[in-house]
Amino acid sequence: MSLSPGREYRLEKQGRSWFARSLSGLSSEKGAVIALVALFLPVAVLSLGIVADLGVIFAARRLAQAACDLGALAGCQELDWDLLAQGIVFIDEERGRAKAIEYTRDNLWGMENLFRDVKVTATVDNSARDAPAVIVEAYVVVDTYFLRWIPGLESGVTLIVIAESSVVERTKW
């Protein structure tokens, strides 16, 4: 091989190629890769675990929010029909609260492996004459695996989810 006219360069000397000679200087650093892998592998696994726990928390919050939304909508359907016949929109407080809690709990049922300590409360607000409402609150604890090592999160992450639904009187037919 010639790089300039009249001169020849040989890449092989003493029976070894230039590539083998350049790698021979790295033989003293063979253990460095193992040390780096041993150092950063637990950090990588912990990071992936925390990301997975955060994904579980966000998914649990969406499921709890959907259950509360459905409960609030179900509670709004419990109208007092006698007052509605007189033109007054009014939610029966006892039936509306019971129906909201029942539907919320039914939609959270079967998720015991995701939620712990589920508390559901519902209130019916008939104070606004033109838009009575049902408010559902759910307190759930989500168990985590990697985040429990963070101080304050040993017993899980508590989520508070609130949903509100109201009945609006129709003014035009």
Image: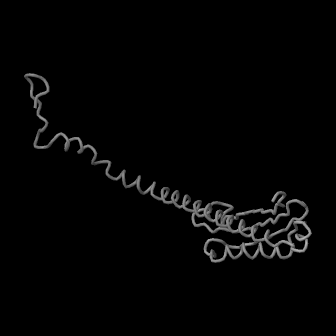
Q: Toward which corner of the image does residue 158 lie, by quadrant?
A: bottom right
Residue drawn at x 84%, y 71% as measured from the top left? 79
Residue drawn at x 78%, y 63% as measured from the top left? 165
The foreground one among 138 and 80 is 80
Q: Is residue 60 above or below residue 1?
A: below
For the N terminus, give its image quadrant: top left
Q: Residue furthest left?
A: 6
Q: Toward which corner of the image does residue 119 lie, by quadrant?
A: bottom right
Q: Toward which corner of the image does residue 16 lie, by quadrant?
A: top left
Residue 94 location (% of width, % of height): 86, 75
Q: Is residue 35 above or below residue 13?
A: below
Residue 171 location (% of width, % of height): 84, 57
Residue 23 location (% of width, % of height): 24, 44
Residue 156 location (% of width, % of height): 66, 66
Answer with left or right where residue 7 lies relative to residue 114: left
Answer with left or right where residue 54 lies relative to residue 107: left
The foreground one among 40 and 127 is 127
